Image: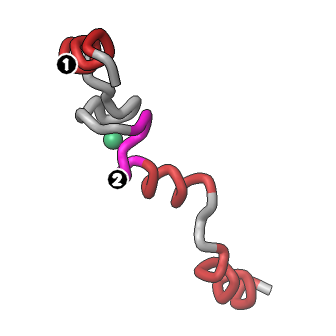
Amino acid sequence: MNLLEKALNFLYPQTCGICNKICNEPICKKCELKLNKIINPNRKCFLPLKRNLL
Ligand SMILES: [Zn+2]
């Protein structure tokens, strides 16, 4: 990392795109987990419900 990059990182630290917390990634681990749950819900939880309905 050169001096310019260091200065840019200091002035404009990379923040989470969702909660705006400073982190090294575009999305922090917490929000990544939340997103994963929304995008890939645990389908095993829904199977017993479906069986009861049928
Ligand atoms: Zn976040």
Q: Tell whether label 1 touches label 2 (CB within 8 Å).
A: no
Query: Quarter containing ligand 1?
Result: top left
Residue located at (25% from left, 14% from top): 3
Per the image, is 29 magenta?
yes
Q: Which amino acid does label 1 sit on?
A: Phe
Task: Determine which of the numbered discs, if any, sits on residue 30 in the image.
Answer: 2
The residue pinned by badge 1 equals 10
Give the residues in magenta. 25-31
Numbered circles on residues, count = 2
Q: Closer to the N terminus: mark 2 or mark 1?
A: 1
Query: 6 or 38, which lies in front?
Result: 6
Mark 1 residue element: helix
Q: In which quarter of the image is residue 23?
A: top left
Residue located at (26% from left, 23% from top): 13
Query: 38 or 21, which lies in front?
Result: 21
Q: In which quarter of the image is residue 8?
A: top left
Residue located at (69% from left, 83% from top): 47
Q: Position of residue 36 (x, y in %)?
A: 54, 56
Quarter that holds the N terminus: top left
Residue labelled 2 has its Cβ within 8 Å of some atom of ligand 1: yes
Q: Where is residue 46 in the image (x, y as percent from the top left)?
A: 64, 78
Q: Is residue 31 above or below residue 36?
A: above
